[in-house]
Image: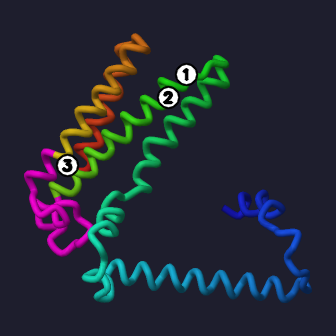
Amino acid sequence: MPLAGIALAPLLVSPHAPSSPRGSVAVSVEAARRRRALRRVRCSAAAASGGDGDADELSRATLLWRAAKLPIYSVALVPLTVGTAAAYNHAGLFFARRYFGLLAAAILVITWLNLSSNDVYDSDTGADKNKKESVVNIVGSWAVTQYAANVPLLFGFGGLFWAFTEAGDVRFITLVLCAILCGYVSQVF
């Protein structure tokens, strides 16, 4: 992160910002870092303890937004993008339709993993009993969540099999199915 900050520093500095002595900037930056770190600790502590009572006031849409767990989808985006960049560097070809089709399929399969093997399984074991962000607790039904989880799985497999037919290599679908199985097993066990 520090290297990225150094590289992006010229882009982040506004030419309209008032100039100030170097020492006061360093002090204010350090104070801002401390405040952010303290805020993160407070947020983490509140999340770990189940919140401070404000969760009862959260809307259903906010709870669903939290239940979506958006950072988990980087597991689909990053490897696919890096692999596509490497393939483009090697062969000089980019198939946008295949890339976005695989990205959509991967996101759908991860959605199934999140709903089925995570939320439904945690509901079965009682791990999410008091977790307001659990999809099973929001929906109110284990069966509805399980059946709803199977829809993105079917569409995701459809996208994967489409990409398999485009690629024409049986190793592709074999490796992807093994990866999905490993993801499911790691979530459940």
Residue ID for mark 2: 99
Q: Considering depth in this image, is 28 or 104 the residue closer to the camera?
A: 104
Q: Is residue 76 left or right of residue 119?
A: right
Q: Earlier in the sequence, mark 2 or mark 3?
A: 2
Mark pair 2, 1: CA separation: 6 Å
Residue under label 3, please give it.
Answer: 116
| CB contact under 8 Å: marks 2 and 1 | yes
Q: Secondary structure at mark 3?
A: helix
Q: What percent of the width, then of the height, locates residue 17?
A: 85, 76
Looking at the picture, tell me which residue is in the foreground, 44 or 62: 62
Residue visible at 15% across and 55% down in the picture? 121
- The amino acid type of the residue labelled 1 equals Phe
Q: Which span is picked out in magenta?
A: 122-147
Please indicate whether residue 165 sits to the left or right of residue 132 in the image: right
In x, y percent, where is residue 141? 9, 59
Q: Answer with mark 1 or mark 3, whichever residue precedes in sequence.
A: 1
Q: Is residue 130 magenta?
A: yes
Q: Which mark is residue 95?
A: 1
Horizontal and vertical percent for residue 138? Answer: 19, 65
What secondary structure is found at the residue carrying circle 1?
A: loop
> Mark 3 packing: few (<14 Cα in 10 Å), some, or many (20+)?
many
> Circle 2 sits in a helix, a strand or a loop, which is it?
helix
